[in-house]
């Protein structure tokens, strides 16, 4: 879902969707997700502007021309600004255990926390769908964490992990094909 009607999502509906997202299994029941819900066009524009330099630099490193970069950044901005709500999903690292002397265990702890946030994001999308909203997951915040934290003055422990765009669907796209189970599953 990438195209939305120009229609706001009522706050009570958004809160119901966000609340539903919190009822997922999570590591140690620490609930390490944090949501940055951007309802206003101004806030979504601030997010676009915050992420733009990192995105443009990544596209330059990939060898894209200036014109190609302009097209790609324009599409991204249009998509983000066209949604009624943008929810930045963050991992609150300070909610999880800390193992400064055991890097392997610390990595596992952080991964469990990030998995918890990801589950909440998936649940958020399902909850939105059940309420007649469309949504799409975007991984871009992973590449602009510091810029997002600075733009919204987020606590240092909030690590942006993903972005969910929400709104009333302007169109229902055809489902994309999925790989058959026999290609992706081993049974023993």
Image (spheres, grey):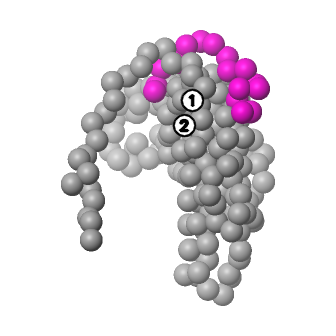
Could you tell me how far apart the alpha carbons at marks 2 and 1 are, in whole angstroms? 6 Å
Q: Residue 101 got which mark?
A: none
- Residue 3 on the magenta span: yes
Q: Position of residue 49 (x, y in %)?
A: 61, 33
Q: Position of residue 3 (x, y in %)?
A: 48, 20
- Give the residue number, with chain letter if any, for mark 2: 126
Residue 128, can we see it? yes
Residue 133 placement, left or right of 29: left
- Give the residue number, with chain letter if any, for mark 1: 130
Residue 173 placement, left or right of 184: right
Quadrant into which the C terminus falls: bottom left
Q: Quadrant of residue 65?
A: top left
Residue 6 placement, left or right of 3: right
User: Toward the viewer: 63 or 31?
Assistant: 31
Residue at x 69%, y 48% (from the top left corner): 22
Considering the numbered disc 1 on the image, is that residue within a helix, a strand or a loop? helix
Considering the numbered disc 2 on the image, is that residue within a helix, a strand or a loop? helix
Q: Residue furthest front?
A: 188
Discs 2, 1 touching: Cβ within 8 Å: yes
Q: Residue furthest bottom?
A: 101
- Residue 157 on the magenta span: no
Residue at x 68%, y 81% (from the top left corner): 99
Q: Residues within 10 Å of mark 1 (few under 14, many from 20)?
A: few
Q: Residue furthest top?
A: 6
For the record, the magenta segment spans: 1-16
User: Toward the viewer: 105 or 103?
Assistant: 105
């Amino acid at each position: 879902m990438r195209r939305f009607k120009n229609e706001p999502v009522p706050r009570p509906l958004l809160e119901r969707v966000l609340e539903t997202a919190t009822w997922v299994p999570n590591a140690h029941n620490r609930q390490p997700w944090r949501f940055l819900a951007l309802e206003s066009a101004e806030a979504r524009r601030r997010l676009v502007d915050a992420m733009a330099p990192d995105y443009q630099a990544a596209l330059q490193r990939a060898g894209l021309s200036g014109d190609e970069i302009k097209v790609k950044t324009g599409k991204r901005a249009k998509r983000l600004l066209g949604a009624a709500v943008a929810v930045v999903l963050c991992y609150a690292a300070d909610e999880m255990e800390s193992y400064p002397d055991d890097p392997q265990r610390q990595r596992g702890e952080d991964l469990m926390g990030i998995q918890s946030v990801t589950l909440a994001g998936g649940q958020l999308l399902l909850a939105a769908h059940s309420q007649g909203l469309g949504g799409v997951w975007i991984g871009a915040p992973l590449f602009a964490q510091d810029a997002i934290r600075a733009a919204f003055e987020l606590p240092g422990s909030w690590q942006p992990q993903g972005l969910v765009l929400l709104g009333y669907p302007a169109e229902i796209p055809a489902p994309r094909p999925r790989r058959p189970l026999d290609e992706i599953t081993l049974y023993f």
